[in-house]
Image (spheres, rainbow, N blue to C red):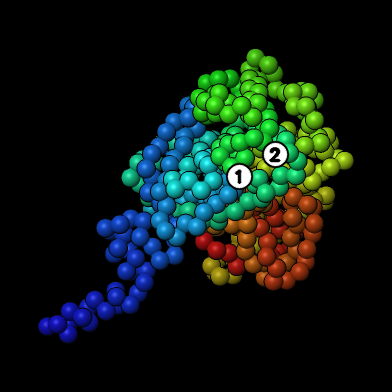
Amino acid sequence: MLQNTLKRISPILFNPKLVEVALQAFQPTASFDEIRATVVAVRKETHDTTSITLKPNSLFKGMKSGQYARVNVEINGRRVGRTYSLSVVEGSALLRFTVKQIEGGAVSTYINSNLKAGDTVVLDSIGGEFTLAKAKTSTLQFVAAGSGITPVMSMLYTLEKTAPQTPVQFFYISRNRDNRIFADELDALAARWPALTLINHDSDTQGVPTAEVIAAALPGFGSLSTWVCGPRVMLEGIQPFFSAQPELLVTETFMPPVFAKAGDDMGPVSVVLDNLNRSFTTEGDQPLLQQIEAQGIQPQNGCRMGICATCTCLKVQGATQNLLTGEISNAPNELIKLCSTRALSDITLNIEL
Ligand code: FES
């Protein structure tokens, strides 16, 4: 009798994944290898932006202000994730990510509409270079637009805690007060932290600011360490101010880049997904990630703009073009990022789902 019982349960006892699933029935964040986190609070910041506060399991080993993590949720039985920046002070036991709903964005829509306290999410792909470690001057400047506030908010809280004497100037662009993410938190921070100069710019009444307008509001702009997070067009306008000292400018964008064109338009090419035993013919110039998704296949991905490397896969053979740099490569067995690469010839890939 005992022997039969042991026989029945032994495959479970010796299969870590099955043990994990069994444990998760009692403790949803239990895991041997995943950073699982409980949603402890969900808060609307604006009509289209939501903050989620998370309590991660013990596998979480910390992240720096300004860094991002991929937040994975389960939608219709399938795990999908996107990268979002931390928006609380570095070292906080509870994490907070702030998510603006993107039209057609499955994960951002789910977080804004469905995620609730008590749910479980999975975090991975923690990283990013948009951090305070890049500070090179004694006065620091920040520029953010819209949801670009998210990593900046975390940095401001961290500076207030760790270097409260540091003069900090922050130029924040939003449409109006109702759309200003963290409006109350920012007002409270500026009221209690004398070293912070907060400049709110509402584009509804003041217009979309040019780089010159931003520079006029921030004394010494171009000669001080400056972090800029916003749409690519804003970053491109600001870059010339730092042409003499480019090392002072740290940027992050949340809008997909405008991809460089290859030059000659290529005809359709064949893509073989070797490990999946699937193949298809490309249509148009879109990045491989979009081409593969159009086939109903969901490769792993995060930022979708060539930053996080989550979509990296092995190109076994064929010619591809990096759409961010324009670089063309025929090298076999090289790693490529699906979200920012297009096929120039028939290619073979091994992709992670
Ligand atoms: S999804 Fe982030 S680099 Fe491709």
- Tag 2 and tag 1, C-beta contact below 8 Å: yes
Report x, y in % for residue 141.
71, 34
In the displayed image of the protein, which residue is found farthest to the top?
Answer: 205
**Between residues 225 and 26, which one lies in front from this camera angle?**
225
Report x, y in % for residue 187.
54, 24
Report x, y in % for residue 288.
65, 55
At 60% across and 44% down in the image, what residue appears? Answer: 66
Is residue 352 among the parts visible in the rendering?
Answer: yes
Q: Is residue 68 left or right of residue 32?
A: right
What residue type is disc 1 on?
Gly
Helix, strand or loop for disc 1: loop
**Between residues 222 and 179, which one lies in front from this camera angle?**
222
Residue labelled with disc 1:
66
Residue labelled with disc 2:
227
Q: Is residue 277 left or right of residue 53?
A: right
At 44% across and 65% down in the image, what residue appears? Answer: 33
**Between residues 27 and 155, which one lies in front from this camera angle?**
155
Is residue 179 among the parts visible in the rendering?
Answer: no
Helix, strand or loop for disc 2: strand
Q: Quadrant of residue 41?
A: top left
